[in-house]
Image (cartoon, rainbow, N blue to C red):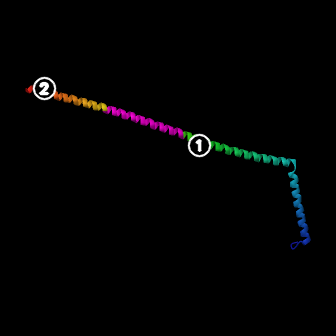
Amino acid sequence: MKNYEPNFVERQKQAAEAREAQLKKLRLKTAAANEPESLARQAERRANAEARKLRIAEASALKIRQKKEALEQAAERERIAESERVAKAEEDARQQEREAALRASELAQQKERDIEREKERKAERDRRYAARKARKK
């Protein structure tokens, strides 16, 4: 049988049998696909796929909402921080103005004291001069 070669008729017969076997297999699959159990499984698979798509869409929407909220919160924190920086800068400016006014007031008072001391020294000098002149006469 080692050198056995089927003739043309045998090859045609085998090809026809193979086609019949394939057709039979296909008929069994389509018949099984139309059975109520198979239809129920297919419907369940479709429902699961739709539910999965819905869950994925909801998760994506949730992530987007969370990112949006996080960005809004960050923006709000930044606005608050900026307003605090502005308020602090304004308070610092007011404090510096108060300090400058206080220094100016202190300088003015010091200047007045210096002028008063100078007047007292001049009066004392004038008094000594007058006394000296009075002694010479």
Of the 4 image quadrants, the one containing the N terminus is bottom right
Mark 2 or mark 1, which has the lower sequence index? 1
Please tell me whether mark 1 sits on a helix, a strand or a loop.
Answer: helix
The kind of residue on which mark 1 rests is Leu
> In the displayed structure, does residue 133 sit left or right of residue 117?
left
What element does badge 2 sit on? helix
Rendered residue at 42%/37% (across/down)? 93
Give me the disc on residue 89.
none
Residue at 27% x, 30% y is 113
2 or 1: mark nearer the eye: 2
Distance from disc 2 to disc 1, alpha carbons, whole Å, reads 88 Å
Relative height, residue 118 to residue 17 (above, below): above
- The disc at residue 131 is 2
What percent of the width, then of the height, locates residue 88?
46, 37
Q: Position of residue 19 (x, y in %)?
A: 88, 63
Q: Quadrant of the C terminus?
A: top left
Does the segment drawn in magenta span residue 55?
Answer: no
Q: Residue at x 19, y 30 (%)?
A: 122
Indicate left or right for 82 with 31 as reference: left
Crowdedness near tag 2: few (<14), some (14–19) or many (≥20) residues, C-alpha within 10 Å:
few
Amino acid at the residue labelled 2: Ala
Q: Residue furthest left?
A: 137
Residue 86 x, y percent position in the rendering: 48, 38
Determine whether label 2 and label 1 are within 8 Å by CB: no
Bounds of the magenta segment: 78-107
Residue drawn where x is 22% and y is 31% of the image:
118
User: What is the x, y in percent for residue 20?
Assistant: 90, 62
Q: Is residue 65 left or right of residue 12?
A: left
Task: Specify the label residue 71 is tagged with.
Answer: 1
